[in-house]
Image (cartoon, grey):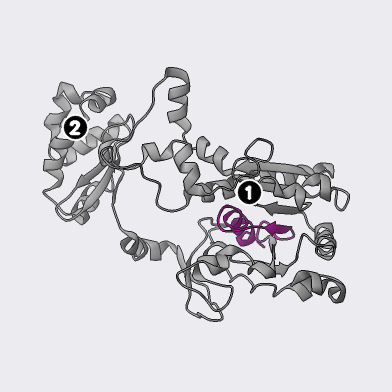
Amino acid sequence: MKPLEGLRILTVEQFGAGPYGSLFLADLGADVIKIENADTGGDAARGGGPYPLGDNDSLYFQGWNTNKRSVTLDLKSAGGRAALHRLVAGADAIMQNLRGDQAVKLGLDYASLAPVNAKIVCGHISAYGRDNERASRPGYDFLMQAEAGLMSLTGDPDGDPARFGPSIIDFMTGVTLDVGLLACLLRAQRTGIGCDVDTSLFDVALHQLNYAATWYLNRGHAATRLARSSHFSATPVQTFQAKDGWIFVMCMTEKFWRLLAETIGRPDLLNDARFADMESRSVHREALTAELDRAFQDRTVAEWITLLGPFIPIGPVYDIAQALESPFVETIGMVRQVPHPLLPDMRLLANPLRIDGERPEQAVCSALGADNDALLEDMAGARSETV
């Protein structure tokens, strides 16, 4: 039995943050029902390129939406709203990631749905929040990385501001809402009363500054980008070039620093006053980098991983192909086959959670509106409102 079996969660979601959050809930056993608008082709991710899977489906879409079902409703119509209420009456929660002013307009907030189901928990993801002057503004992940200061900390100091590669704020926001939603569901089970629970892309992006924000707020220290993707304060924590590629070394403690110097054959560095402690090494980071560069260029990436891996945090710097084709990824089962009607050998990333040692099973998301007949009562009256 999956841990969330028995929960029914409705979603009104597009693209990333909402679907990524509900993906976890679906993989963990919740009955997640995507409420989509057939007139617009459903979730915009269904048309996400460059690899379609027939009409209204794509590899991009399936990556966010395994184990979910789909119904089509026009939430702006009376019939669609009535069908929504029938679903809400038998649901535990509803999630949405529309613009901040849309939840009230479409009747997706707790005040609108409590008369239908007092225990319903209404989870909201918006760009900037639902209760401020930006509530109606659209927004996406990369905008948040820019405004929250994250791009000023990413990339080489001599390069242009850079965003994180994948949509990391979407991912973090989806999981953040999951935590809030599940906490509120526990309370609703005890009290019989649901609620609204909110987060926003901007709030989550700003929260990722974490200790860099704490330093600035309390000491006025504004962290900046450092060469070699270095840590802001710990050294050596950065990339180094081996004979045939790049490695990342993380000496976050004095113990690891001493082991590194001794194992690479440079115990003399331990007696150099410039490198006596973490603070001194940070001040003399460039000089230490030059010393370590000479040592690391004597061996290949594989040789350094073999030599240092058992004792020191070290890893190869891979591209996407190398990362996904790594034998370790196969060993741990992080890629699995999830058959699709149009692509029987489709492969997706597995869920990173394990329950009793097993990763949750995955199945493709239903086709657009495929579950209307199974999930909506009185379809004869509602059908014209759902397509």
* Depicted 46 relative to depicted 222: above or below: below
* Depicted 220 relative to depicted 247: above or below: above
Place residue 72 in its image quadrant. bottom right
Q: Is residue 233 left or right of residue 115?
A: left
Q: Is residue 249 left or right of residue 93?
A: left
Q: Is residue 59 left or right of residue 118?
A: left
Q: Residue at x 72, y 58 (%)?
A: 10
Quadrant of the snapshot with the C terminus:
bottom right
Give the spatial CA distance, label 1 vs label 2: 42 Å
Give the magenta-colored segment's residue range: 1-29
> Looking at the image, can residue 326 be seen?
no
The verdict on residue 27 being magenta is: yes
Which of 226/91 is in front?
A: 226
The residue beneath circle 2 is 286
> Looking at the image, can residue 85 be seen?
yes
Quadrant of the snapshot with the N terminus:
bottom right
Image coords of residue 199 (percent x, y): 63, 42
Give SS at disc 2. helix
**Residue 178 tag number:** 1
Give SS at disc 1. helix
* Depicted 182 relative to depicted 270: above or below: below
Image coords of residue 224 (percent x, y): 34, 32
User: Hey, what amino acid is under mark 1?
Assistant: Asp
User: Hey, what amino acid is under mark 2?
Assistant: Glu
The verdict on residue 346 being magenta is: no
Which of 325/111 is in front?
A: 111
